[in-house]
Image (tube, rainbow, N blue to C red):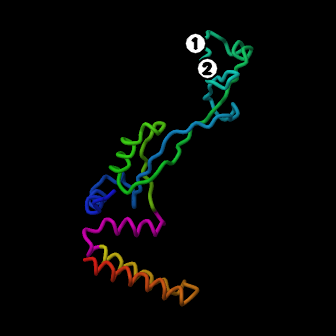
Amino acid sequence: MTFDLEAIAHEMRTQDNRITAHPLFCVFEKERIYGVEDGYSDDFVWIDQDHERIDIEEHDWSEEQAEENGCSKVYYVTRDKFVNAHFTEKAADEHIRINGHNLNNGFTYVTSLHRCSEMIAIREMLMRDSINGMLMALTEAKVALEAYRDNVNSAETWKHALGEVDNAIANALAAN
């Protein structure tokens, strides 16, 4: 599968970020967790002796009659379950469109990558207009690394990190 990074970058720059800095568009679905105590939820289902859901109204039973017939009232809570994440809302919506049949009430939710420096750096690099913009971002990353060198415990680790950034810049230049 191939992706048009320029199109993704354009979408990231122009989409509605829902008033969120460094947005990440997450896909969630609803999940029921059964077996909670009745004091923790007002939602319940009736389960028969074979552990199948049963509609006691369809049988015209009261709750007492359902229990006399071996049925149990089982309480549940519904929670939002994380499925996956996308850089664009368009991609998240497309995932739901294509894979919605496997989701239980799938929906998108935007969250912030606040204080998640690695993901913010990747996101910002993707949003650059061209390979030159990516080179600029790599150069900025090197400058940032140099600013934090005092926090590195090992000089050898520091040299290796700077060498990796230099290699990435050289490879990007060679590809351009």
> Where residue 165 sits in the image (x, y, percent)?
41, 81
Circle 2: element type? strand
Secondary-structure class at tag 1: loop
Is the magenta region chiefly helix, strand or loop?
helix
- Residue at mark 2: 54
Decide: marks 1, 2 in contact (CB < 8 A)? Answer: yes
Residue located farthest toward the bottom when viewing the structure as drawn: 155
On screen, 74 above or below 71? below
| Amino acid on which the number 2 mark rests in the picture | Ile
158 inside magenta stretch: no
Q: Which residues are magenta?
A: 114-133
User: Is 124 on the left or on the right of 42, as rendered?
Assistant: left
Is 99 in front, or is 80? 99
Asked if the stretch drawn in magenta spans residue 116, the answer is yes
Residue 64 coordinates in the image, percent (x, y)? 72, 14
Identity of the residue drawn at 36% across and 41% down: 97
Dot 1 alpha-carbon crowd within 10 angstroms: few under 14, some 14 to 19, many 20 or more: few
**Along the line of sight, the residue nearer the viewer: 45 or 100:** 100
Task: Please determine whether, in this image, residue 45 is positioned above or below residue 123.
Answer: above
